Image: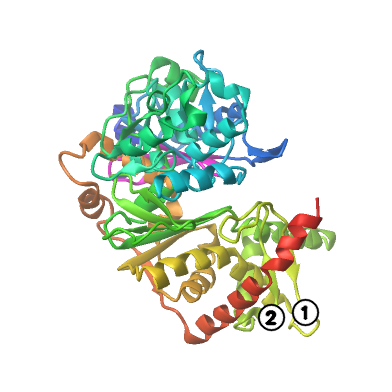
Amino acid sequence: MNLVETSKAIQQGNVSLGIELGSTRIKAVLVTNDFNTIASGSYVWENKFESGIWTYSLDEVWEGIQRSYMQIAADVQGKYHATLTKISAIGVSAMMHGYLVFSKNNTLLTPFRTWRNNMTEQAADELTELFQFNIPQRWSIAHLYQAILNKEPHVNDIQFMTTLAGYVHWKLSGERVLGIGDASGVFPIDEVAETFNTSFLDKFESLENVAHYQWNIRDILPKVLKAGDHAGTLTREGAKLLDVNGNLQEGSIMAPPEGDAGTGMISTNSVRKRTGNISVGTSAFSMVVLDKPLKKAYRDIDIVTTPNGAPVAMVHINNCSSDINAWANIFKEFAERLGIDLKMDRLYETLFLVSAKADPDAGGLINYSYLSGENITKMPAGRPLFVRKPDSSFTLANFVQTQLYAAFAPLKIGMDILKNEEQISTDVMIAQGGLFKTPVIGQQILANALNTPITVMSTAGEGGAWGMAVLAVYAQYGNEQQSLEDFLDQKVFTHPESMTLSPEPEGVSGYEAFIKKYQDGLPIESVAVQSIS
């Protein structure tokens, strides 16, 4: 669309809004019906570690959303000389999993417990044994059952449980619903029925620790919807909550709220069977859309779904880029002491490019990027740790290479289960995230680590908010007219731009040497967790 056409689309309300609440940034994007981003806004935030719990304030949720929307409205006014008053469809996505519970009068009963908490080991183990289905510690049902086991008083008053995306959607529309992908991180999904697994619900209700509560698990869970379903409309109160200036009208179609894993699949066109994608950021996860069920349950493999309900094998790691960011800030501080004002994008690019001169095994250096606990390597708490032997090759290139290698290490351990135990392969594996902004470097390391070709698409840089905006547009079409897979292929990704890198033999063997040292050194990290309080 040209400037005049875009301005007309805005005035007619032929635009859609996607909002995503990520772990370090809230972002909103406004797209036209041809999926081009015409305005965006963002808000930087950080989770807080309070009273032993990783959490975010719900007040800051709305501050971030409102500021992001205000930036979009100002952008639209400045570029197109139009006031944003009508939006055809809106979608909300956010970090998956975690624990948000509310009372009868809609009061938050306990601070939001995010995916980053690994405080539910007993509950997760017991439920996994009960269902014979892997229940990760970060899933909502694990948090609920752990609160029950801990005899936390708030459990008596629960009337509604949801995710962060479900909460925001509820406040904007009044509807207590979840997209099936996000719902699959709350409670296991029945692939055929496309809702929560009823036999598992029955087993949960019959538990001795659960049966005496007045609420029923079925009543406190949200309704499950698929991509393309209508999930209500923006209410008058919701419009005022989103646009504090009061210009936005009610009535926008609401798409089912989704998790960031689902929007990652959308923005990389990875919803067909035998496709896969990897999203990296504060945490990281890989998603492989299955064409056959796994032979057994694995504690390090989650079974979730695409936004249209297809089963997905998910490897989730709690720690990825946080330690890289911490070291980058040290280098920036050093540069400032020298009187150099170094922009962060330039700093990351410089550091990443120097790693191209590193030894294939990173010189024998090891790093554990654990700002928080890591379930795959059985670490209950975070203690970032850099280790080297006296004879290691301690150079800047090897140091940076070690940080990049370590960011992907737990992901490789989990992915090796799918590859070696289940012989799962994909026709394509697409990656997205900030680590790939510098061309080639991170992409090649990931290809070497997983020993598989990795593709990076230009649209992947748009992020989850754009993916959620695409789902908002799809909600207007409806899944009865066209499947999500065909919609993405035929309407969204008609001329995809991408680059694929294949594994390099020397890099593959170098990473294998690194990962062996990494796994051999895990007892050192375990001691650090136990001894440093």
Front residue of 497 and 426:
426
Residue occupying image coordinates x 43% and y 44%? 130
As for residue 262 lying within the magenta part, the answer is: no
Label 2 sits on residue? 364
Q: Is residue 157 above or below residue 452?
A: above
Q: Circle 2 — which element?
A: helix
Part of the protein shown in magenta: 18-42
Please give the name of the residue rendered at 44% of the width and 79% of the height, measured from the top-left corner.
Answer: 503
Left or right of 260? Residue 180 is left
Residue situated in front as seen by the camera: 522 or 62 = 522
Q: Position of residue 189 (x, y in %)?
A: 34, 42
**In the image, is 386 to the left or to the right of 314?**
right
Residue placed under numbered mark 1 in the picture: 389
Residue 413: x and y in percent read 52, 67
Q: Report the side of 275 relative to 100 (left or right).
A: left
Q: Secondary structure at mark 1?
A: loop
Marks 1 and 2 in Cβ contact (< 8 Å): yes
Amino acid of disc 1: Lys
Relative horizontal placement of residue 221, taking residue 230 as reference (left or right): right
Query: Which residue appears farthest toward the front when viewing the image?
Result: 208
Amino acid at circle 2: Gly
User: Residue 409's x, y, as percent?
Assistant: 57, 67
* The N terminus - image quarter: top left
Q: Measure the C-alpha gap from mark 1 to mark 2.
A: 8 Å
Residue 46, position in %: x, y? 64, 42
Image position of 231 with respect to 301: above or below = above
